Amino acid sequence: MIALIIVIVIVVLLALALWVAFNGLVKKRNRTQEAFSEIDVELKRRHDLIPNLVSTVQGYAAHEQGTFEAVTQARANAVTAGATGDPGKIGPAENALSGTLRSLFAVAENYPQLRAVESFLQLQETLSATEDKIEYARRYYNTSARDYNIALQTFPRNLIAEPFRFKAVAFFAADGEDRAVPQVSFPATVPSVIASTPSGALPGPEGPVAAG
C-alpha cells in the first residue's frame, strides 16, 4: 500500500512538473512572438517612409538614379524577407536596406536646396525615431528568444519540446553600423523661401515643385 502511494505521488509530481514546464514554454514562446510583432510593426513603418523619402530626394538629384534604384531594390528585398517571418532572413535584408539609406543621405548632403525642404527634414527625423524603436524592439526580441531557446534545452522542458512542437527561434542579427541611420546635419532654421512657396509646393532647383 505504501509503495502504491509513493508511486502515485511520484507520478503526480512528474505530471505537475511537466505541466509547469509546458506552461513556461508557452509563455516564453508567446513573449517572443509578441516581441517580434513589435519589430514587424516598426519595420513596416520604415518601409512606408522610404518611397516618400526617395521621391523627395529625387526631385533635387534626379541624376543619382543608381542610388534611388539601389534603395528601391533593397526595400523590395526587405519587404519580401519580412513576409517570411524569419528573423534570420529579415535581419540581413534590413541591414542591406540601411546601407543604401546611408548612401541616399550622403547624396542629400550635396544639395543645399533639399536641406531647406521641411518635408525632407520631417521624413529624416521620423525615420531616425523609427530606427530607435526598431533597435529597442530588436533587443527585447533577442532577449526573449535567448530565454526561450535556453528553456527548450533544459530539463524537464526538453522532454516535451519536440512532442509538443516547440521549436527554437532565430535571433534578429544586426551590425551596429548597418542599423544606424546616417545623421545628416541641417540648419536649425528653415529659409524663408518655404514660407513664400505656395501651399502644397516645394522649392526646387528650377522653382516651386508640386509636392508628390
Image (spheres, rainbow, N blue to C red):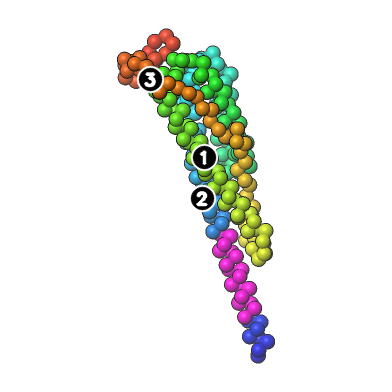
User: Distance from label 2 to label 1 (Cα)?
Assistant: 14 Å
Q: Is residue 98 above or below residue 111?
A: below
User: Distance from label 1 to label 3 (Cα)?
Assistant: 29 Å
Q: Is residue 72 above or below residue 173?
A: above
Decide: few, some or many residues near mark 1? Use Cα within 10 Å; few <14, some 14-19, many ≥20: many
Query: Residue 50: image x %, image y %?
Result: 49, 28
Instruction: Name which residue lies at 57% across and 34% down.
Output: 179
Whether residue 66 is visible, yes or no, is yes
Q: Amino acid at mark 3?
A: Val
Residue indicated by mark 3: 190
Q: Amino acid at mark 1?
A: Ile
Residue 21 is tagged as: none
Indicate which disc, 1 or 3, sits on the residue closer to the N terminus. Answer: 1
Q: Quadrant of the N terminus?
A: bottom right
Query: In the current view of this chain or complex, which residue is farthest to the front?
Result: 188
Of residues 163 and 145, the one nearer the viewer is: 145
Whether residue 76 is visible, yes or no, is no
